[in-house]
Image (spheres, rainbow, N blue to C red):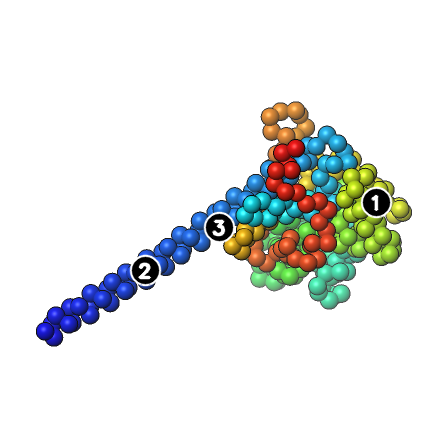
Amino acid sequence: MVLVLWVLSILIIMAGSFALSMRREAAIVSVIKNNAHVMAIAESGLALAEMMLLNPDPNKVWRADGNIYEIVAADAKIRIRLLSETGKIDINKADQAALQSLMAFAPVDSDQQSKLVNAILDWRDADDLVHIDGAEKEEYLEAGLKYEPRNKPFESTEELQLILGMNKSVLAWLDPLVTVYSKQPHVNYQVATKQILQTIPGLDEGIVDSYVAMRLDSAKNNLPVPPFPVSTGGINNAAGQDNILTLVSEAITNDGSKASLSVVIKKSDNNGTTPFQILKWQHVTANNVSLFTAAMSELVVKQYAEPELNN
């Protein structure tokens, strides 16, 4: 009898362990399924954005000025943000003054700001002459690094992480503000975000706030993009805003699953079957700012029910 009880106990423990294992595996499968589902929804947002960028009506085409478009589907919401690369600061073309003005807002002290600016200049210039507070080969070796400045233009913004003195917080702050695709020394004011406009020397904060509000209102009411009210050397032209731009698409389902991705696309020069070329594709991590925050909600210019996009 004792042996029978022991055998039954062992069988019960084995059965319980098996059931627990199956529940865990089922939960894992469910999470994987939900993640794949919400990621597919986020990817569909990119396709919708490309379609809306081809709208023949210039006042209804989606704008790449940092504002947000929202689509409400049966089981999910999608928010899509478009950012023109001409509205960002090109780290290969911006001069020292522009970089210094940008870095003045970075989350580091003023001494480190200057060092980062000059290290960027030393990285991209063709010589081995060290800027004041800058860094060339010797400084990288002294820091124990096994690489040296390329002495060539940046190939991508990710290359900034190699700059001597760069840290994760500054890199994350810089990411939405800089580009290598603009090829222009100045920013296009009409498609620059408020955060970028605030870093440009000579632009009054009140003028920036007023213009951003006016631009948002024009998008909501299908009116032409207003010209920027003052000129301080920047570009004031909304034409060609969709030549190269970043699309950020974030989806959230009714069960709370989230997925977000960022894609840099370029409008094709010909009239081929592919209107856009993908230059960069990446999944957005939890460290990035969600498009579903209260601050981002203020940037929503249009909301669509899913069937409306078919009209």
Q: Which residue is label 1 attached to?
A: 234
Amino acid type at image mark 3: Asn
SS label for mark 2: helix
- On the image, the x and y values in percent for residue 155 come to 64, 44
Q: Which mark is residue 21?
A: 2
Above or below residue 208? Residue 82 is above
From the image, which quarter does the C terminus lie in? top right
Q: Are marks 2 and 3 in contact (CB under 8 Å)?
A: no
Q: Which residue is label 3 attached to?
A: 35
Q: CA distance from mark 2 to mark 3?
A: 21 Å
| Badge 2: residue crowd in 10 Å (few <14, some 14–19, many ≥20) | few
Query: Which label's residue is closer to the chain start, 2 or 3?
Result: 2
Q: Nearer the viewer, residue 183 or 229?
A: 229
Q: Are marks 1 and 3 in contact (CB under 8 Å)?
A: no
Query: Which label's residue is closer to the chain start, 1 or 2?
Result: 2
Left or right: residue 102 versus residue 21 is: right
Q: CA distance from mark 1 to mark 3?
A: 42 Å
Residue at horizontal 52 percent and vertical 43 percent from the top: 40
Residue at horizontal 40 percent and vertical 56 percent from the top: 27
- On the image, the x and y values in percent for residue 100 come to 78, 56
Amino acid type at image mark 2: Ser
Query: Which label's residue is closer to the chain start, 1 or 3?
Result: 3
Q: Is residue 137 visible to the viewer in this orientation of the structure?
A: no
SS label for mark 1: loop
Above or below residue 200? Residue 53 is above
Q: Nearer the viewer, residue 125 or 280?
A: 280
Residue at horizontal 80 percent and vertical 55 percent from the top: 198
SS label for mark 3: helix
Q: CA distance from mark 1 to mark 2?
A: 62 Å
